[in-house]
Image (cartoon, coloured by chain):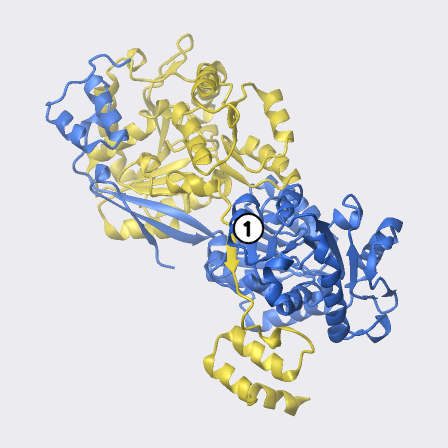
Chain colours: A yellow, B blue
Amino acid sequence: MELSTFAILDPVVGAIAAGNAVVLKPSEIAPAMSSLLAKYVGQYLDSSAVRVVEGAIPETSALLEQKWDKIFYTGNGRVARVVMTAAAKHLTPVVLELGGKSPVLVDSDVNLKIAVRRIIAGKWGCNNGQACISPDYIITTREFAGKLREMLERELNRFYGSEPLQSSDLSRIVNSNHFDRLVRLLDDEKVAGKIVYGGQRDKAQLKIAPTLLLDVPQDSLIMNEEIFGPLLPIITVEKLEDSYDMITSRTKPLAAYLFTNRKNVKEQFVKTISAGGLVINDSAIHLTVHSLPFGGVEESGMGSYHGKFSFDAFSHKKAVLYRSFLGDAPVRYPPYTHGKMKLLRALIGGSILGILQALVGWSSYSALKEKSA
Amino acid sequence: MAPKKAGMRLLFFPSKAEIVPEPYGLVLIMTSWNFPLGLALEPLIGAIAAGNVIVIKPSELAPATSSFLANTIPQYLDNTAIKVIEGGPEASHRLLQQKWDKIFYTGSPRVGRIVMTEAAKHLTPVTLELGGKCPLIFDYSSISSNLKVAVRRLTSAKWGSCSGQACIAIDYVLMEEKFALSLIDMLKRIITRLYGENIGTLVNITRIVNKNHFDRICSYLKDPVVAASIVHGGSYDEEKLLIEPTILLNPPLDSAVMNEEIFGPILPIVTLKNIQESIELINSRPKPLALYAFTHDDAFKNRIVSETSSGSVLFNDVLIHYLCDELPFGGIGQSGMGRYHGKYSFEAFSHEKPVLYRGYYPDLAARYPPWNAFKMEFCRLGYNVDYLNLALHLLGLRRYPKKDD
């Protein structure tokens, strides 16, 4: 559904590079992309090795009943559990690329304009928030919130204009189900009065404008599911350190972002926050870094890919040991005498002295054992 | 463990990236009964090294080791970080209902499926060290000058490893039919020498772990066609749970003994016209945890490595890869998923967290809307890492499509 071509073909590249035969089941929620892939994969790739199967739940269920050697799933936690349970029947290893609520911590000691631009690029620049690594919510200090909000509003105006629903640079919401879901988050009575910017929506166009909310309650709907849309809550705390408890009390997200110039804050963040990946002073961009494994942890997924990690994800690293018949140690065979046990112990322990002692037949271990016997 | 630096492209200048290993958190280790101490402690070492908190559930089929661990671990290791929980299937079932950050299971594929199904409810990653029918390809003619050592090693990996009750024990042998009788003859002599003449004088060999497994293994021999293929041994002592080293010659390929992991002292020998056929036979079966081959034929070795799939491959020796810290130990397909030993143990219990540090300048306007043809071309060149054209593009020295189609 999100970042369509990229997310779909990226794992296929890894699978093919590792020498596998691949069946690709694109999401039915993006039907145009699904048929495009079915057409072009059939035309340009070896059909005996790479196939596309289109369809929705019945087709997916039928696919999951088959015995696969590996399953790679990108999506949400609910379906991931179904995938892994189906995989368990055949002991099929899985890579699950899921999501979560990716928090953004913004410190007051920061280059605010660039930080805000990068937050916007990662949030609304990525499919209008419909990306697994989009910033989900911001945490900043009460003191700094005003400045941050002002800069966000200013840059949002610059990027999308004063009529964002008319901007051709704003993605639609993928379908009416998700549109309604997002509108429900906005219309939640717990967040009434918290919308401080945006909130415009057009059902016919399936468009929702970039929207900022300030200090929504922790138990509101919007703070308890992955937003996956253009709504950005800003949560304020007394001091930045207070945000760590808030983040760690939730399930581990796919990404966590920090904007700061302070070295000690960076260190504290990296040490305390566990997530699929962390980015300091930018957002979402780690997706494009080939040398970093991209994946989640806990609720945000398992396994990783991108670059060489994609090849690894679809390979079994087989250990091969070549041995000679020469030098066959009698210590390996019965009868298992005391002397053999001493030598074996020394060999496994890797102590040269111990080996010499055992060979000479003199070992403190044996003396002790004799005593206690 | 120090973070690993990751290389960054010039495109992302200025940036720094590293991969920081962190513990998964709360780990469950469930062990098997055949090497109960080693199989409990080896993963435990990896989990502790990686910084996790651990619960060990030793197998109830090895009760003495289970209580030893339950009594000794609290005396020497931090009780708030490492706990031992004893019990049978009921205890395992209840433990599996909890939410773990990682589960490490050693045992059978049947229970492996149950573990993974329960883990799926919480999206818990698992390492499953299972088993399989580990074949030995015995290329008799190729190793004719080393037969004595080869036979010794075969013996040690069958009857010498807990009477065949080991995940990497040799399950069955594949060889050319013209040499079968010679090998059987050599095996009979070595069995007699190392383990005794018959069931009454059996020494140096383990008993079967319990009545269930004893009955299971004996039932293989109750199939009349299989019984007819016994060329050595076949006797057992129910009271002492002993089964003598038994060799079968060409039992039917569809019999139980040739389709279940034997995990006992029965050795089927399957003969072929040509040793090269062994690859096809092995590939027609589930992938084993270990594949052994005794051969000096390099071309054959290459074929084996590239045309078969198994957890590991071992040429001209047996079992010893288990002790190699540098080699990952784990299965594939029915024989398991994930791996450990040495540094791989640390990795099995760590989440490798990538951290990307970015500088502010230069901050490229091309990243931000409103989009236009110039910015789209910039993104396209950046994606292709085409530095030369990127530079020309930024300097305005390049023509590009003005309409973004």
Kind of residue at disc 1 = Phe
Q: Position of residue B335 (x, y in %)?
A: 62, 49
Give the position of the C terminus of chain A as an image quadrant.
Answer: bottom right
Residue designated by label 1: B300
Q: Position of residue B151 (x, y in %)?
A: 66, 66
Secondary element under disc 1, as helix, strand or loop, is: helix
Q: Residue at x 54, y 21 (%)?
A: A53
Whether residue B344 sits left or right of residue B184 in the image: it is left
Whether residue B332 sits left or right of residue A136 in the image: it is right
Chain assignment, label 1: B
Whether residue B177 is situated above or below residue A96 in the rendered picture: below
Whether residue B302 is situated above or below residue B378 in the rendered picture: below
Q: Nearer the viewer, residue B3 or B181?
A: B181
Q: Position of residue A141 (x, y in %)?
A: 29, 40
Whether residue A345 is situated above or below residue B37 in the rendered picture: below
Whether residue B18 is situated above or below residue A229 in the rendered picture: below
